[in-house]
Amino acid sequence: MTKFRFYFPDNKDFVDPNFDGRSNNRTKYHRQYDDDHYPHQILAELPYDGMLVSLAGVGTMQKRGKYYDQELTEDFYFSGARKFLRLDSSEYERIRLMGDCGAFDYHNEYEPPFTVDELIEFYDRGGFDYGISLDHIVFPYFKDEEAKDVAAEKCDLHELIAESERRIDITLKNAKEFYVKSQNYQFEAYGVAHGYDKNSFIRSVKELQEIGYRRITIGGMIKSKTDELLELLECLNRIRESDTQFHLLGICRFENIPAYINAGVTSADSTSPLMQGLKAGKYYSVNPNSIRFSESLMIRVRQYDHDNVQKHIDKYRDELRQYISELQDNNGFDIDLSSAALSVNECVKRLEIDCLKKLQQYDETGLDLDVTLKALIAYERVTNENYLPSKSTESKQMQLKRNEDKYHQFLLAREWRQCTCGICKGGLMNIIFRSNQSNRRRGIHNLAIVTKHKNNVLKSINPAAK
């Protein structure tokens, strides 16, 4: 049966399980990590097949990690990865643990800041299932000679290639040492293939296979275009040993899973689904009768008491007073803000309250969509400087209209009401584009959707598994 595993990189992406977007309630005296839940704890179904943890993120007992403070680092080494990530119960036994060095986080350094021995200690004490060799990332990738010619006009191509070769040599040298030493430990070793063109990647994969690796990660392609990635994988598949498996580091464009599988890729890791929800406001959904997932633009309601909104009000106070009056006169919202006794701050706050109230009512009843949308757009107009009269342009107004249409489609579909991920049962206010808690929940919801999509794709490839 064809398999493809999706690994989610650990960046401390957990949430307060007691958060309620309707009342804004949270855990009292909240302690990060101690009181928080990971995605697999808060979702109704497993949102990934594995988790990837980097040494650069956790750190060592002597070197501070990028994401972990010293106390968490000590807890990680003492408890091991599975217990620390709360994967130590039987319901999560199918989730695999993969470790890597986190080369992206030190790509500006001349040499990796860790040794092979430090990396192996990290994997051993963490109790990882798979460990990736110590690499030094290579970023430039040239699809063909024409691409090199274009780059030569902007930079010193010979110097760029020389630096890439130096990093490839470091990566392969470390891979040899890592492979030999890893034989004394329980985790399975992955070698890292880097390159700046097809030939250098082919050379890396061949050498890794000669060393003995049958699990190889393809690194440094996170910035590549889809056609470049697929073309490269097709080339590498031709020189791949029959029992060699590829893993894509940091990149998983889920619509390409069938092509990945055909090229010998059996797994990939990516934070993209979560980040698209967290920062880009994307809400994913999947049709049970389709193998594709769709993206919706989540409605955004800025927090009135957030520093950015307060600075916005202070900066445009006089204009906002006039603009709110104009909106009132032109039936731009349905509440009465005509009293001269109301300050600009009070007006904006009342518009926020009106917007949130109507969104909650619509969430619960499905009624008065147009009234709800009207309140939403009114609040957007006064809290986004792009739509103030002094800043507005025809293109910006067209963008607002496009967003309004997308909001209308999203609210009308009410897909969150049918979603069974476990996040959406808390209602619209728990996933709107508003606070860190609701934004991160939306991203976690996306993890559940892409995994469901991935499983649907695998079922379509393996009919007998249906």
Image (cartoon, rainbow, N blue to C red):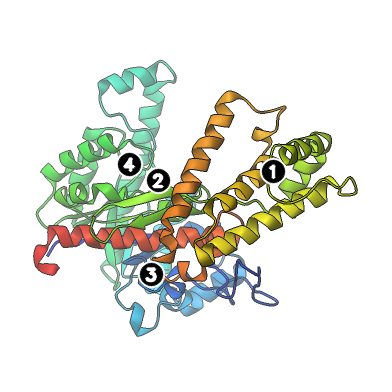
The residue carrying mark 4 is 169
Give residue 9's position: percent from left, percent from top.
Answer: 42, 59
Question: What amino acid is found at the position of numbered circle 1 in the picture?
Answer: Thr
Give residue 383's mark.
1
Residue 227 appears anywhere in the view? yes
Residues under numbered marks 4 and 3 in contact, where contact means CB atoms less than 8 Å apart = no
- Cα gap from disc 1 to disc 2, whole angstroms: 44 Å
Sequence-wise first label, 3 or 2: 2
Secondary element at tag 4: helix
Dot 3 crowding, Cα within 10 Å, few <14, some 14–19, many 20+: some
The residue carrying mark 2 is 136
Q: Nearer the viewer, residue 204 or 377?
A: 377
User: What residue is shown at x 45% (from left), y 51% (from top)?
Assistant: 410
User: What residue is shown at x 18% (from left), y 57% (from top)?
Assistant: 214
Sequence-wise first label, 4 or 2: 2
Q: Is residue 357 above or below residue 250?
A: below
Question: What amino acid is found at the position of numbered circle 3 in the picture?
Answer: Thr
Question: Does residue 28 appear left or right of residue 456 in this picture?
Answer: right
Of labels 4 and 3, the one closer to you: 3
Image-quadrant location for residue 27: bottom right
The furthest residue to the right: 341
Give residue 266's position: percent from left, percent from top.
Answer: 22, 57
